[in-house]
């Protein structure tokens, strides 16, 4: 269950990246996105988020480092809740196939973000908590292991930097 949840949470930061990319839903198509950290065309998990082109334009996302890990905050406009649920279900199904052994995750194409996050989750040293409220979904990914916390902080910072590049802002801050 944790592995499945990890891959769903893994995709949350990509939501904003896709939304910020505007008319360029694929990493390679966006003039400022070529690092491979986010790959909306080829990543087995993230491509599910691009199926409804309007979804990501109506989604906001923030990422923050917290003392023992990272936190994401996502909002989805109510009119797009069904599209988000469909994307989450597709990612859950893929996660279930990985967990059952039907699919070897090493055979999947994943973006740098999903690879990094997935490896941390597979360490077994991560705690996940998700709160689904009326206004937002808050996900906390924490650890008691200082090395894992450092890696989570690195992922949070890289997400912020990559999003800033996609927006044309090099400050590293999230914008909506």
Image (tube, rainbow, N blue to C red):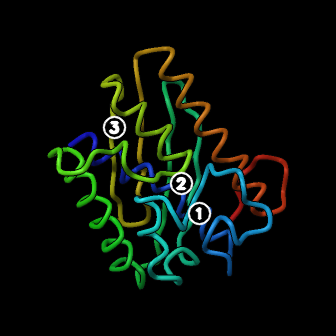
Q: Residue at x 76, y 54 (%)?
A: 164
Nearer-N-terminus badge (3/1): 1
Label placed on residue 16: 1
Residue 167's spot in the image, x, y percent?
77, 63
Q: Quadrant of the C terminus?
A: bottom right
Secondary structure under the numbered disc 1 in the rendered image = helix
141 above or below 171? above
Label placed on residue 72: none
Q: CA distance from mark 2 to mark 3?
A: 15 Å
Residue sitting farthest toward the left: 100
Q: Residues within 10 Å of mark 2 (few under 14, many from 20)?
A: many
Label placed on residue 128: 3
Q: Which residue is mark 2?
A: 13
76 above or below 54? above
Residue closer to the observer: 133 or 129 = 129
Q: Quadrant of the N terminus?
A: top left
State if disc 1 and disc 2 touch (CB < 8 Å): yes
Q: CA distance from mark 2 to mark 1?
A: 6 Å
Residue 174's spot in the image, x, y percent?
69, 54
Q: Quadrant of residue 112?
A: top right
23 left or right, relative to 63 = right
139 left or right, relative to 102 = right
Tally of marks: 3
Nearer-N-terminus badge (2/3): 2
Q: Residue at x 37, y 77 (%)?
A: 81
């Amino acid at each position: 269950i944790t592995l499945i949840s990890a891959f769903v949470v893994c995709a949350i930061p990509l939501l904003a990246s896709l939304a910020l990319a505007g008319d360029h839903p694929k990493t390679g198509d966006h003039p400022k996105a070529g690092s491979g950290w986010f790959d909306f065309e080829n990543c087995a998990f993230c491509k599910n988020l691009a199926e409804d082109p309007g979804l990501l334009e109506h989604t906001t996302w923030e990422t923050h480092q917290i003392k023992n890990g990272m936190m994401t905050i996502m909002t989805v406009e109510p009119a797009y809740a069904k599209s988000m649920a469909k994307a989450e279900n597709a990612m859950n199904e893929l996660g279930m196939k990985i967990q059952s052994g039907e699919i070897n995750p090493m055979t999947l194409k994943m973006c740098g973000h999903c690879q990094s996050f997935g490896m941390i989750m597979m360490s077994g040293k991560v705690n996940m908590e998700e709160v689904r409220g009326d206004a937002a979904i808050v996900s906390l990914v924490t650890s008691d292991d200082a090395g894992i916390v450092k890696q989570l902080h690195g992922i949070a910072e890289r997400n912020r930097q990559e999003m800033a590049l996609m927006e044309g802002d090099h400050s590293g801050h999230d914008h909506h």
